[in-house]
Image: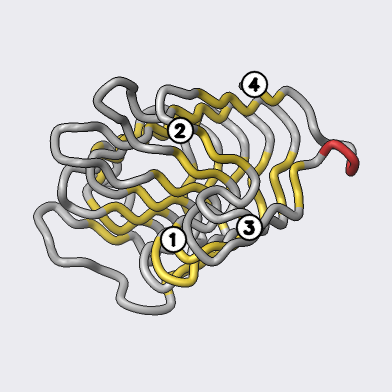
Amino acid sequence: VSITDCTDKPGSLTGGSQNYGAAINVSAGGALNLYAGNITKNKNTKDGGAIYLCAATKELKGAVFQMYGGSITENESTYGGAIRMAGSAEGLESGTFRMYGGVISGNKAGDMGGAIHAPGGAVVNLQGGTITGNTAAVGGGIFTNTSGAEVSVSGNPTVMDNTASGKQNVIGVSVICFLGNVVGTVLGISERH
């Protein structure tokens, strides 16, 4: 599925409340591309205030979400205020999120990952865009755990002004916390304190 424009109020993805992706649930083997528009004001009490990416099965790869533009704003969930990737079974991949542009802002997670929650097996690749103004108890911008999740950065993305209200760090190897912006293993931004 590709979303190219939903900026008019009737076309906006808003008001969703289903668990596991209040607005969009991308099944294993599925792909979602966002080019323009706004996914806003969706809320649930489980995972993925806006988008949930399903993990792989034995037959299908994990779901993929690529963001080229548009915005994901003011969504709320327990894990992953904007985006939550499902945890993977041993040997299987979780979801993949690639950000080339756009804005993820003003999202809230009651527990972990104000913007993004990436458990073991998840891949997050930031090449552009802005992640700002998101809040959570842990990992206001991005939360990853240390059991196989990968967050890499290249290009010129902005991850700033996100807030973690509770414990800002987790125990594990190569855990980095940037004032609530990122909790977890990060490749490519250690020089950007």
Q: Amino acid at mark 2?
A: Asn
Disc 2 or 1, which lies upstream in sequence? Answer: 1
> Which of these two is toward me, 185 or 93?
93
Q: In x, y percent, where is residue 13?
A: 75, 43
Q: Give me the residue at 25% from left, 41% from top.
A: 88
Q: Give me the residue at 41% from left, 29% from top.
A: 28
Determine whether the residue tagged by mark 1 lies in a helix, strand or loop.
strand
Crowd rating for badge 3 (residues with CA inside 10 Å; few <14, some 14–19, many 20+): many
* Quarter containing the C terminus: bottom left
Determine whether the residue tagged by mark 3 lies in a helix, strand or loop.
loop
Q: Amino acid at mark 3?
A: Asn
Q: CA distance from mark 4 to mark 2?
A: 24 Å
Q: CA distance from mark 3 to mark 2?
A: 25 Å
Determine whether the residue tagged by mark 4 lies in a helix, strand or loop.
strand
> Which of these two is toward me, 189 or 114?
114
Residue 169 horizontal side relative to residue 180, left or right: left
Q: Which mark is residue 156?
A: 2
In which quadrant of the rendered view does residue 76 lie?
bottom right
Q: CA distance from mark 4 to mark 1?
A: 24 Å
Q: CA distance from mark 3 to mark 4?
A: 20 Å
Crowd rating for badge 2 (residues with CA inside 10 Å; few <14, some 14–19, many 20+): few
Which of pointers 2 and 1 indicates the residue nearer the eye? 1
Which of pointers 4 and 2 indicates the residue nearer the eye? 4
Disc 4 or 1, which lies upstream in sequence? Answer: 4
Q: Which residue is mark 1?
A: 79
Q: Is residue 46 above or below residue 88?
A: below
Which of pointers 3 and 2 indicates the residue nearer the eye? 3
Disc 3 or 2, which lies upstream in sequence? Answer: 3
Crowd rating for badge 4 (residues with CA inside 10 Å; few <14, some 14–19, many 20+): few
Kindly give the residue lying farthest to the bottom in the view shown.
166
Q: Amino acid at mark 1?
A: Tyr
Q: Which mark is residue 75?
A: 3
